[in-house]
Image: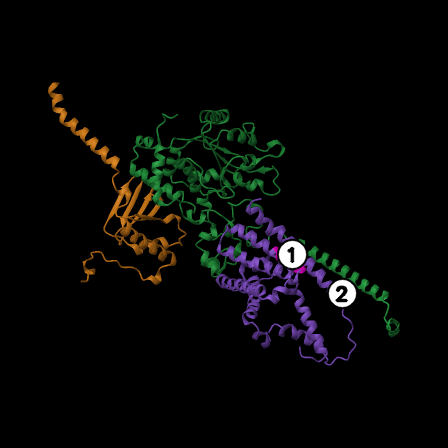
Amino acid sequence: MNTMEMLAWVRGPGLALSLSVLVIGVSVRLLEMFLLGRRPDLSEPRVAHSGWYGLRTMVTRSVPPSSCARYRLPAFLAGYAFHIGLFLIVFFFVPHILLIEAITGFSWTGLNAWLIDGVTLITLMALLLVFWYRISDPVRRFLSNFNDWYALLVTFLPVLSGYLAYHRLLLDYNTLLVIHILSVELLLVSLPFTKLMHAFTLWFSRWYNGQMAGRKGVKA
Amino acid sequence: MNTFPGIGVQVNFAPADRLSDNVLALLHEIAGLLERLVDTGESGSIDLRGLPLLPGERDALKTVLGEGEVRATLDALGETAIHETRLAGVWWVSHCDRNGEQIAEFIEVTRVPVILQSDSRDVRDAGEVLRAQLAEWTALPDAEEEA
Amino acid sequence: MDDEPTLTQRLRQQGISRRSFLKYCAGLASMMALPPALAPKIAEALERARRPAVIWLSFQECTACTESLTRSFSPTIENLIFNVISLDYHHTLQAASGTHAEEARRQSMAQNKGRYILVVDGSIPVRDGGVYSTIAGISNLDMLRETAADAAAIVSVGTCASYGGLPHARPNPTGAVPVSEILPERTIVHVPGCPPIPVVISGVIAHVLTFGKLPELDDIGRPKMFYGQTIHDRCYRRPFYDRNLFAESFDDEGARQGWCLYKLGCKGPTTRNACATEKWNQGTSFPIQSGHPCLGCSEPDFWDAGSFYQALTAPPVDVSKWVAPAVATGVVAGAAIGLANRLRRAKAARARQPLTADDVKTED
């Protein structure tokens, strides 16, 4: 199998396969959770529309609480940086938008390649910083298991390989492209079965927390 | 002492803001090659065909470099036009075939392009041919006398 | 044939001066993408070169490779190249036909055993014993094997001979394969392109003649000197890609401004060829300069790599065909698992034996 054949495979069947696994995995896990249901809350609700509190929490939880910033500011900023970075890279790099457009039909304006390039560099450094905190701090290291290291790795690889491919570093461009797409497919396949699932569950759990707290009349 | 008035050739460049990045990069390379020629005596050249130039950039470069004092034309399998640019030691060499189509184009940074110099074997051959011809001419009257 | 005159001797006989020869070598160096300083070395090597025989076999092809080589050449260079080689067999170009042509091939093979260069254009059909393409009653498969056996070097010209090309595209009714699949044990120089750039074809031949060995090849057999960089890397429209300026259609402002053609399906980033620098028609232009995206014609299976007009990142297969059933599968499986969990919970609830205060007392 030469590089072009591999590229054809990862771009075609490989992508279709990994997207299928992602879709199956995510729907199974979400349905499994939803169907489990919640124990009926028989207490008197303190507010009329507790659902609204759920919606509000979905947004407000993205805003950093001031108390967190006091504790290890760089780690805190790195967390934000790589999440925002990933979002910009995945959804605002023109080749990525064209891929999404080809699959879904939706399209929007991308950002300049050099801008995405800078964002990628920041994201890579933020991910390395996060890794460094996890490995250098004995408590975090003790609390980390395989799931944590693996999630960090499969997030890091697509960004790194994409950066290398864009700059044609170390290897031939097509080889880098194969590695980049494969690493993305590894991420897609891993997502439903690791803690990366939070990309989806985050919104539901926030809503749940907000709604539950709101019903009890607690500020969340 | 101000030496500038002593220089006979005036180098007038177009303002840099009108030149594209590619042309500026080439000019930097030429400057480097000129320094090398002075320091080590080593010649250098740039193959203009192998460069991803934008349409018009080649002409811009040619205009900026301009034409100097020396101009030469070779009739060798079609015309080859060589001229020294306004910069001494920078030569524009353009090889064409018999149909007038360009086959190669170089900027050579050297004292004299190699193709202008006479090949030592050709020089030797020329000497031998001339000697033989002279021998023939000087021998001619004797032969007539004998006849 | 050691008494045969060398190239310089022959050129001198034709009244070609040393300067002309040096000029020719400068042209060759430029053609082979070698530094101009190598021209005197090329001259030196060529002065010692003998005239090798070339046998050119055309199989499942459209003759565009030959057209490319013979049409776009400046006649002087072409004459010189053909002065350097002895083209003993090429069924489009040779005067002889029929049995005489085949006779010429066999004769050249016998006389130049182990020394001739074999050039192939077109793919070779192997299905049903190779009956789908024959020359003088000989299948392409047999002719290739026979001619390749004593060849000093083999050059596959064009994407068909190099990677199968159009005949190899799905569903490949003739079972077309590239030369390298018939002769896996041989090192074959691939000069892909549909057609290849003429100076690339002649540059490779010139390299073999000049240095007496094959040029350095990449992982799929292409000479690195011509296929070392991607079209995208050498494209004069590259700055527009970096600045996010794209033509969105063939007739919008971006197209008129000459912006990047990535969104119109340009395969430049994954295509290795010399179009962006060598260009076509005596260096006049190349597809991207003429406003058309690169098709990637020098890459294996470019016919089957999705639409020419869809962006490179667009998957070549219809992903929705996979994802829709996947959604259905996921929903059904999720529902099944969810229901099973509920049943299990209900069962556990039924089987539960509540602990009462009395139970606690008796244990005390």
Spot the orange chain and give its letter.
B
Dominant SS in magenta: helix
Horizontally, residue C293 falls left or right of residue C322, namely left
Q: Relative to the observer, which residue lies in front, C251 or C219?
A: C219
Q: x, y (%) of residue C221?
A: 50, 41
C290 is higher (above) or lower (below) than C191: below
The residues tagged by marks 2 and 1 sit, at their Cα atoms, a distance apart of 23 Å
The C terminus of chain C lies in quadrant? bottom right
Q: Residues within 10 Å of mark 2 (few under 14, many from 20)?
A: some
Of all chains, the one bearing label 1 is A
Which element type, helix, strand or loop, lies under badge 2?
Answer: helix
Image mark for residue A35:
2
The magenta span reads A185-193
Q: Is residue C15 left or right of residue C297?
A: left
Q: Amino acid at mark 2?
A: Leu
Q: Tell me, for residue C114, which label it has, or none.
A: none
- What residue is shown at x 68% (from left), y 75% (from top)? A210
Residue at image location 35% in from the left, 30% down from the top: C6
Going from N to C along the chain, the mark reached first, 2 or 1, is: 2
Q: Could you say which disc has been placed on residue A189 in the image?
A: 1
Q: Residue furthest left?
A: B145
Amino acid tagged 1? Val
Residue B21, located in which quarter of the rendered image? bottom left
Q: Position of residue C307 (x, y in %)?
A: 57, 50
In the figure, the green chain has which letter?
C
Question: Circle 1 sits in a helix, a strand or a loop, which is it?
Answer: helix
> Residue C272: where, in percent of width, then height?
49, 47
Res. C214 image quadrant: top left
| Residue A58 colored in magenta in the image | no
Tell which residue pokes out farthest to the front in this image.
C364
Q: Colour of chain A?
A: purple
